[in-house]
Amino acid sequence: MARQMTAGEDIAMRRKKLRYRAWHRGTREMDLVLGPFADAHTEAMNEVQLDQLEALMSEEDPPLLTWVMGQVEPPEHIDRDFLAQVIADHHARLAK
């Protein structure tokens, strides 16, 4: 019989899966944007914030990269505040 996971185990597993997905996107450019962001922030994220990250990561890499690079405005369904946090984190890492 399978052991039931507690809520804490569920969210820990979700964080681990999101960190893995962030580093294994399919394009190296997005791995280098989302991977470090996920590593640095998922442990402190609540369920709502994890939902925001998951929603952003459900987008295809080519358009997501154009949004991160500021080449194209993201569509209305994208949480622009959360995207801005990801972009700011990426720029801060580049500045180091």
Image (cartoon, helix red, strand yellow):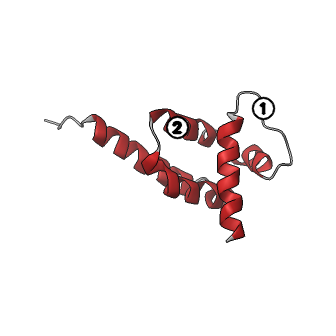
Q: Position of residue 35 (x, y in %)?
A: 56, 57
Query: SS at mark 2?
Result: helix
Which residue shows up at 80% across the image and 48% down it? 66
> What's the residue type where badge 1 is placed?
Pro
Tell me if 73 is positioned left or right of 43 in this view.
right
Q: Check residue 20 in the rendering and tell me which mark sits there, or answer none.
A: none
Q: Position of residue 96 (x, y in %)?
A: 67, 71
Which residue shows up at 64% across the image and 61% down it? 32
Does 58 appear above or below 34? above
| Label 1 environment density (alpha carbons within 10 Å; few <14, some 14–19, many ≥20) | few
Which residue shows up at 56% across the image and 41% down it? 53
Which residue shows up at 77% across the image and 44% down it? 63
Q: CA distance from mark 1 to mark 2?
A: 19 Å
Q: Is residue 60 visible?
A: no
Q: Check residue 75 in the rendering and tell me which mark sits there, or answer none.
A: 1
Quarter location, residue 31: bottom right
Task: Give whichever of discs 1 and 2 has the lower sequence position.
Answer: 2
Tell me if 48 is positioned left or right of 96 in this view.
left
> What's the residue type where badge 2 is placed?
Gln
| Mark 2, residue position | 49
Furthest-top residue in view?
Answer: 77
How many labels were placed on the picture? 2
Quadrant for the N terminus in the image: top left
Quarter location, residue 46: top left
